Amino acid sequence: MHDLIDRLAARQDDLVAIRHDLHRHPEMGFEERRTAALVAGKLREWGIQVEEGVAGTGVVGTLKGRLPGQRAIALRADMDALPIHETTGLPHASIHPGVMHACGHDGHTTMLLGAARYLAENPNFAGIVHFIFQPAEEGLGGGRRMVEEGLFERFPADAVFGLHNEPGLALGRFGIRTGPMLANVDTWSVIFRGTGGHGAVPHRATDPTQPLAAFIGALQGVIGRNLPARETGVLSVGHIAAGDVRAPNVIPFQAQVSGTGRSFKPEVREIMGRRLRELAESLATAHGCTAEVEYRHDYPALVNTAGEVALAARAAGALAGAEMVDTDFPPITAGEDFAYMLQARPGAFMLVGNGVAEDGSFHHVHTPKFDFNDALIPVGAAYWVSLVAHALGDATDAAGNGKAGNGE
């Protein structure tokens, strides 16, 4: 199994060409028509059964192993880009102003395609593999739509697995944990309303900027004084709007503030939403105003199941060595709509290092200078192949002692 990366690297030029093509032509969520056509075309070229138009622009490939067995697993990659203007200056930079692959979904798609091709040529496993190419991960809930539209009824799977690059983690290192790994994602908004008035005579006005300012100052008290110290919670302000820059002498009649909430447990999520509402309403009343509060639950926390984490860790360890796999990786307060698939089926979400520069620097995801590391492509593809060998074949064979998963 240790030479599997080398075997995948033999196709590196082809895979890099795919990744660079996807990077040059990024597409936003539910608009991934060119990407989906490329994915479907490659899968068909390699003899894999393909279904297109799943949840709009999603693609699912299905491959049956040559060994007898009824178990099925699903492997998922995301395809969409972000509304960010790329500033990498690379030859394969986005040709679409204001849209780029700033999260590495081009690499995720390529790694799963690399694994699909290898497995199609070496189907030494028992059962079925579904290759899920998901649209609209970035905030639009493509994973939820896939599940709601019957993904696992159409493509039955005993377990589902995801893989995401992690900048700042050494190239080829893996990170995973049992239980909550990524956070609940919430969006909140408060509109404070008063009467407004002339800035020269504020005593004749009811000023909504006063409760807004007090609210922002008090907001972190929810985290510091309402949550147990051992629990994780985040409340961040992302937007403030009031008045008109052309009229600085006018007290506005309303002021709005909105932001995001992150947590890992349902009870923490409930406390944060309730206390935010109570703060906003009480401060509005204290200043003679009213408050309209919305606290919306977006993505659920991503929760890995123990058995599948152990399986994924064994697969990564067989590939890279157990010392390269951290099975107690710290939880991350980012969100992921792969969480919806994990609500529907047991599974595990793995992180793999995208690498760091010699000076220790790196560009994080969702930034204009981020680029997926091409050297990671054969590592990620090999992880998928190793996972299939461990899930649908004998793990001793997956370590290189027999046929399943080693292409012999």
Image (cartoon, rainbow, N blue to C red):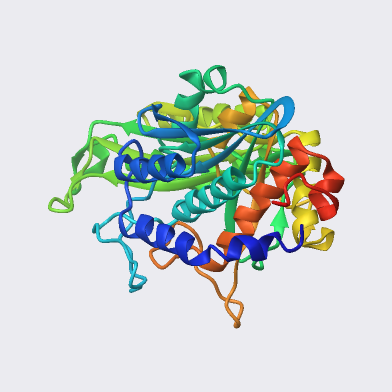
| Residue occupying the far left of the picture | 246
**What's the residue at 79%, 55% (across, down)?**
317
Q: Quadrant of residue 326?
A: bottom right
**What's the residue at 49%, 63% (across, down)?**
372
* Number of numbered discs overlaid on the protein picture: 0
Looking at the image, residue 38 lies above or below residue 99: above
Q: Quadrant of residue 88?
A: bottom left
Q: Quadrant of residue 359?
A: bottom right
Foreground of the two, 373 or 130:
130
- The reply, left or right, for residue 30 in relation to residue 129 is left
Image quarter of the N terminus: bottom right
| Residue occupying the far bottom of the picture | 359
**Residue 231 visible:** yes
- The reply, left or right, for residue 260 in relation to residue 180 is left
Residue 216, horizontal then vertical, whole percent: 46, 45
- The reply, left or right, for residue 57 in relation to residue 78 is left
**What's the residue at 45%, 35% (across, down)?**
187
**What's the residue at 72%, 26% (across, down)?**
71
- The reply, left or right, for residue 46 in relation to residue 271 is left
Residue 272, horizontal then vertical, whole percent: 59, 33
Residue 282, horizontal then vertical, whole percent: 48, 29
Looking at the image, residue 384 lies above or below residue 95: above
Foreground of the two, 274 or 353:
353
Foreground of the two, 326 or 62:
62
**Residue 283 visible:** no
Residue 295, horizontal then vertical, whole percent: 47, 28
